[in-house]
Amino acid sequence: MRMFDTKVQHFKYKIIREVARLEWEGTLLDNIWDIPQMLIPGKTPTMRCCVYKERAIVSERVRMAMGGHKDNPNVIEVLSMACDECPMGGYEVTNACRGCLAHRCEDVCRFGAISYDENHVAHIDKSKCRECGQCSKVCPYTAIIHRKRPCENACKVKAISVGEDMAATIDNDKCISCGACVYMCPFGAIMEKSFVLDVIDLIKKSNNNQNYKMYAVVAPAIASQFTYAKLGQVITGIKALGFDKVMEVALGADIVAKGEAAELVEKGFLTSSCCPAFVTYVEKEFPDMLEHVSHNLSPMGAIGKYIKEKDPTAKVVFIGPCTAKKGEIKKESVAPYIDVVLTFEELQALFDSRDLDILGMEESEIDDASSYGRLFARSGGVAGAVKQGIQEMGADFDLNTIACDGIEQCKIALLQKRKGVLPNNFIEGMACVGGCVGGAGCMTHSDKNKIEVEKYGKLAGDKTIIGVVDALD
């Protein structure tokens, strides 16, 4: 049974699983140094130069599974010890170079970085190259290529660079914590911090007669994960971990859809606020556009607020596909409502740390949100929900939406708005391609994810947004 796309994901899951298992038993600190030996047994290396380095890297992963460096505010960190197998990036001359007489590459280089050997084949001096790319543009054989590391290619906000030790470094002033680099690094050298220990601590205290209930709120993208079982069995499994109640974040999405529809009609132009990576991107790169970001909480924040207003003692754990959510709960506007964030990868690790076979469990029902709220999980879903919200309001508003699928499309739309040439009056901003179903915390990433969420949405029937929200009251 394959639950993950890559072996990197599976290995990360095993580490979190073992950390969680020991924490449940109350023996983590006593046995923490046994985890590397257990996961990397024997003396034969499987991934690195030696087994000792492999175990040292596992120790770093264990630290991330326990919350990472406390002095680093970013939820994404580079494991520098694991980041050493990528080739040096930049512009390189390939064997397609024919040693031509034109030497156009030399002519356009303003830094004297190009020289030739006895066969007239070009070579680039990395110490002089400024990576302007002019040589690559003029080469008639396209023999000069630009190599980037997988993490650099994945990061669309250019927050990743290569340090003097050749390890990747993250610029926290640019990073939006989307986790694209985490998913794309083939060595697993970039990880997001895990807070499974916080969840286990809350559950243990709840079981020890502490005066609060545990609420799990699950993102609608869950319908595309855990494909080996039924959704109702996953919900039962979450309750078996020690949660008193499981609610769907799609209910919060319905609240947001109603609120954003009203806000858009009032203001005339708006961007969505549901994706924390998108909102952070606006804050860092387009601060002049912040006034246009919806003042509504994200669906996660909205359902958390609803729960804590009904039960002020509640402890709320969000479970979803998003690494950026781990940063969102640090914001003053969200912190009072959500206690901890877990990804789907971490939820699977928690199941297995307790040896829970959810496939053999009975199904539990989950709250009934509208199809519009559930479809927030895929690109275009927020725009569709806002459109439905306006129709249900009966407002006379000429809606013109644009669904930005990925941060690059978001950038284009924001630039157009800044220049006054954007024809749309509502921007749906999703940092992950495909929407939440493409989040870094998903166990699987495929076109089927969108299809499964569509099916999940249809199960809601013909419920209206306003009808669902009114029923909550």
Image: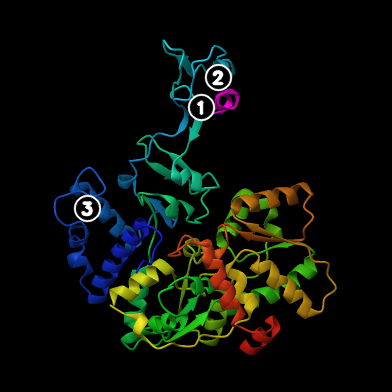
As helix, strand or loop, the secondary structure at mark 2 comes to helix
As helix, strand or loop, the secondary structure at mark 3 comes to helix
Identify the disc placed on residue 144.
1
Q: How is the image coloured?
A: rainbow
Number of residues whose C-alpha sits closer than 10 Å to that of mark 3, classed few (under 14), some (14–19) or many (20 or more)? many
Q: Could you tell me the amino acid type at mark 1?
A: Ile
Question: Dividing the image into 4 quarters, which one contains the N terminus?
Answer: bottom left
The magenta segment: 132-143
Q: Which residue is mark 3?
A: 55
Whole-Å distance between the Cαs marked 3 and 1?
39 Å
Q: Could you tell me the amino acid type at mark 3?
A: Arg
Quadrant assignment, res 63: bottom left
Q: Earlier in the sequence, mark 2 or mark 1?
A: 2
Tell me whether circle 2 and circle 1 mark residues in contact (CB < 8 Å).
yes
Quadrant assignment, res 465: bottom right
Identify the disc placed on residue 97.
none
Residue at the outermost right position = 396
Q: Which residue is mark 2?
A: 105
Q: Residue at x 35, y 56 (%)?
A: 8
Whole-Å distance between the Cαs marked 3 and 2?
46 Å
- Rendered view: 221 above or below 67: below
Depth order, front residue of 229/370: 229
Question: Is residue 249 visible in the rendered structure shown here?
Answer: yes
Q: Earlier in the sequence, mark 3 or mark 2?
A: 3
Whole-Å distance between the Cαs marked 2 and 1?
9 Å
Residue 47 falls inside the magenta stretch: no
Depth order, front residue of 20/212: 20
